[in-house]
Amino acid sequence: MNTKSAVAKLIAQRKPRHALPRALYSDPDVYQQDLDQLWHKDWIFAGHTFELEKSGQYLSLQIGEYPVAVVRGADGQIRAFHNSCRHRGSKVCPDAKGKVAKLVCPYHKWTFELDGRLLFAGNMGDDFDKSQYGLKPVHCEVVNTYIYVCVADAAPDFSSFRQAVSPFLAPHMLDDCKVAFESNLIEKGNWKLVFENNRECYHCDGTHPELMNSFVENLSVAGVGGGDDPELNAHWDRCEAAGLPSQLVMDQEGRFRITRIPLSSGAVSYTMDGKPAVAGRLDASGEADIGALLYFNYPSTWNHFLGDHALSFRVLPIGPNETLVTTKWIVKKTAQEGVDYDLERLTKVWLATNDQDRTLVEGAQVGVNSPAYEPGPFSSKAENGVCQFDDWYCQIMLDRLSDESDSDNLKLKSVG
């Protein structure tokens, strides 16, 4: 059986404006094609440059089948490498984060410079050419502290995303920030269920009491539209007059979206009372109420930027029914815990929200695994964001599977 054709047939079965068929959430062959066609080909959010301030600092992540290390070199440059020793494959950077003088494989002590060059390999003989065994590089791009990596041999264009997102992020002065807190949550659900849950707030009123003290979903920007809400337009006008780009920008292929939305009346931050969690501001706009800047970039990240702090979220698939969600609370570099912010107050809303979402995702995974599951229709009012995500997923998978399918002449239909 041609696995690519089989997966394409499953995707093509999806009804427009309906959830995905059961196998797309759980089948190992589908999961492998998700890795091959998306995660192993696209730009994946790895972390922030301010996490790697000093030479020798690194962070590591697992992108499907590829372990990757991101390192700050002695020259200050951020580079990414396949985290696999050129000797016998052991991870050179074994921890999630660290700081080293050189990159030393823990197995046989092959030693690499921070730029990936092999410096030392004991007992390899006089005819061994070190220059041929440096760490294999991974494509790496940085936009306003966001580090993106791509493990494909040839990376897709990054410039269109950079041009779109950078004007929105620049006013938040992320270069002058740090991570105040990080959480890592393993959700026993397919990565698509995790992102579907993020792309709607249909469930929020009954599930997220902490978040709903400040957050209000704006349905005008949930799908691919925007601009037909007078309150939203007024918010955009006020923020843009203060130098903060705000009007919705949507990628033509649906991969990324950036926009700014108002919070609930009187709220300026994600806290239990809606008041700031951190003294001082990330931006210098002078506008007291900037709401929340939201951006997502499929398949690996969504983000929130407020006046006093920001949050970045990273999604990484672990298996067909398991996903790692990493959340980072970002504050000004000079902010001091216990002086400028209380950590519990800063993190309470999204620690609770993440755990609530985990419960929802895990319950959904159990349900879609049932042979009795049948994909239902999306709400035309409250689930346009989910529909947009599923449309994007189906279309890009069909396009890429079709490009690679050369065995059964399958004609693939568009969906969504």
Image (cartoon, rainbow, N blue to C red):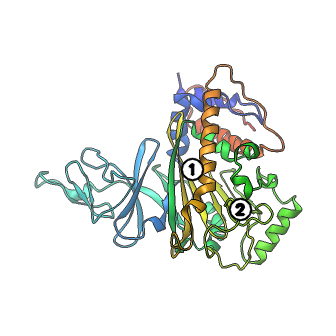
- Relative to 286, does residue 118 appear above or below in the rendering? above
Few, some or many residues within 10 Å of mark 2 (<14, 14–19, 20+): some
Provide the secondary structure element on which disc 2 rests: loop
- Relative to 195, does residue 369 appear above or below in the rendering? above
Marks 1,2: beta carbons within 8 A: no
Q: Residue at x 80, y 51 (%)?
A: 219
Q: Residue at x 81, y 57 (%)?
A: 226
What is the number of callouts on the image? 2
Q: Is residue 397 visible?
A: no
- Relative to 335, does residue 194 appear above or below in the rendering? above
Quadrant in which residue 213 is drawn:
bottom right
What is the number of the mark on residue 300?
Answer: 1
Q: Residue at x 65, y 60 (%)?
A: 304
Of circles 1 and 2, the one toward us is: 2
| Residue 91 position within the rendered picture, expressed as x and y whole percent measured from the top left | 32, 48
Amino acid at pointer 1: Ser
Q: CA distance from mark 1 to mark 2?
A: 30 Å
Quadrant in which residue 383 is drawn:
top right
Q: Is 241 positioned to the left or the right of 317 in the image? A: right
Q: Quadrant of the C terminus?
A: top right
Seen from the viewer's position, the closer of residues 281 and 176 is: 281
Q: Is 56 positioned to the left or the right of 248 in the image? A: left
Label 2: which residue? 273
Provide the secondary structure element on which disc 1 rests: loop
Amino acid at pointer 2: Asp
